[in-house]
Image (cartoon, helix red, strand yellow):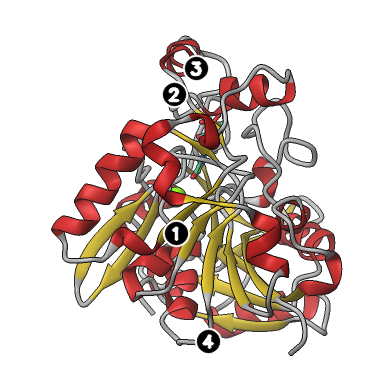
Amino acid sequence: MDTSIVDVVIGMQYGDEGKGKIANQMAQSGDYDYVVRFNGGGNAGHTIYLNGEKIVTHLVPCGVLHGVPSVIGNGCVINTKKLFEELEYLEGLGFDTSILKIAENAHIITQDHIDEDSKDTTIGTTRTGNGPCYKDKVGRTGIRAKDVPELQPYLVDMYSLIHSSPRKFLAEGAQGYWLDIDFGDYPYVTSSNTGVGAVLNNGFNYRQVWNVVGVIKCYSTYVGAKGYQKDDERFEQLREIGQEYGATTGRARQIDWLDLDEVNVACKMNGVDFLIINKMDVLRQVDSAWNLYEDQMVVSCSDENSFMQRIEKYLDSSIEIEFQGQLH
Ligand code: IMP
Ligand code: MG
């Protein structure tokens, strides 16, 4: 290997697909020198079960849970106070957080950003200051990590990290492709790019992108202000059984059947090699729930097997598909 390479984990829906679980499985394989978060901020909530214990992270990459050096990349936005709280929480659980690094050109969320975000009533944001911070970044009035004294010990320059010697990276995405600022359902989106392009904007060149792993659930969820869920008792059941409540805000997620067209587009736009389909054990517990959308029409499958076959037939045959349950 004469250059660094990066494997990427991306959500193909509206976030909460179980990326945390997959990135965690990959990070603990021992294959990676670094885990990098490449977009978003504390709006994300990654739920990971480790040795039976539930751990929720927001900004810190999952590598820290496995002793793998980890980086908050320049595509991310950082609430310094929340970051230190998260580090303290992880240290309290026995993890060594001294292996965390922060891109010197990542942007900082201020109290003004949080105040502005807290006035939002139309998008249903997580009120973490995310959007206003990216607004200042693009408006060239932002504050960067290198401007903050408390962050000096953590700073890293992405060019040296990636290009000074060959290393193997795992890039852990936040949110999902349909929340992407450009390609999502604007304005009901987050304020960053959530797809594979965002990885390149953290300093990787296109040749370095290796495997792209897409993650979905076998049904859809969305959290935010637009009306998304239709009236159907089975969605209420799925919410309870799948515990579909926000890891960051506790809000109830709206539920719908799996949309294969959405997944298909997201796979193509991100060059997905592997697709993980999560929470099969949840869908199994609801009667007559093996449903999905094809061309905006609901298709009801007779059983789990025909549901799986339908998905495999619909998506590009080069994609390697794996079905999983909630925990593994
Ligand atoms: P923001 O990212 O806080 O600005 O929120 C914009 C939209 O993205 C809202 O609909 C949020 O609920 C949604 N969102 C942001 N982060 C996540 C996430 O990690 N999971 C699911 N939805 C998210
Ligand atoms: Mg989440």
Task: Tell which tag, 2 or 1, sits nearer the viewer.
Answer: 1
Which element is circle 4 on?
Answer: loop
From the viewer's perspective, is 201 left or right of 95? right
Please identify, in this view, whether the residue under mark 4 or under mark 2 is nearer the observer.
4
Q: CA distance from mark 1 to mark 3?
A: 23 Å
Look at mark 2 in the image and give the residue it sits on: 127
The answer to whether the residue bearing label 2 lies less than 8 angstroms from the nearest atom of ligand 1 is yes
What is the x, y in percent for residue 218?
Answer: 54, 66
Q: Amino acid at mark 4?
A: Asp
Direction from residue 271 to residue 124 in the image, left or right: left
Answer few, some or many: residues within 10 Å of disc 3's Cα (few below 14, many 20 plus, some between 14 and 19).
many
Estimate the spatial distance between the alpha carbons at disc 1 and disc 4, rounded to whole Å: 15 Å
Q: Position of residue 53 (x, y in %)?
A: 19, 68
**Disc 3 residue type?**
His
Mark closer to the chain start, 1 or 3: 1
Q: CA distance from mark 3 to mark 4?
A: 38 Å
Q: Residue at x 50, y 63 (%)?
A: 19
**Residue on which the image places disc 3:** 113
Where residue 61 is drawn, which disc sits there? 1
Q: Earlier in the sequence, mark 2 or mark 1?
A: 1
Q: Is residue 152 left or right of residue 1?
A: left
Q: Which residue is mark 4?
A: 31
Is the Cβ of the residue at disc 4 closer than 8 Å to that at disc 2?
Answer: no
Looking at marks 4 and 2 on the same chain, the residue that comes earlier in the sequence is marked by 4
Label 1 near label 2: C-beta < 8 Å? no
Dot 1 alpha-carbon crowd within 10 angstroms: few under 14, some 14 to 19, many 20 or more = many
Question: How far across and how far down the image is residue 38, in percent?
Answer: 61, 52
Q: Residue at horizontal 68%, vertical 66%?
A: 162
The amino acid beneath tag 1 is Pro
Instruction: Say what amino acid the circle numbered 2 marks.
Output: Arg
From the image, state whether disc 2 or disc 3 is nearer to you.
3
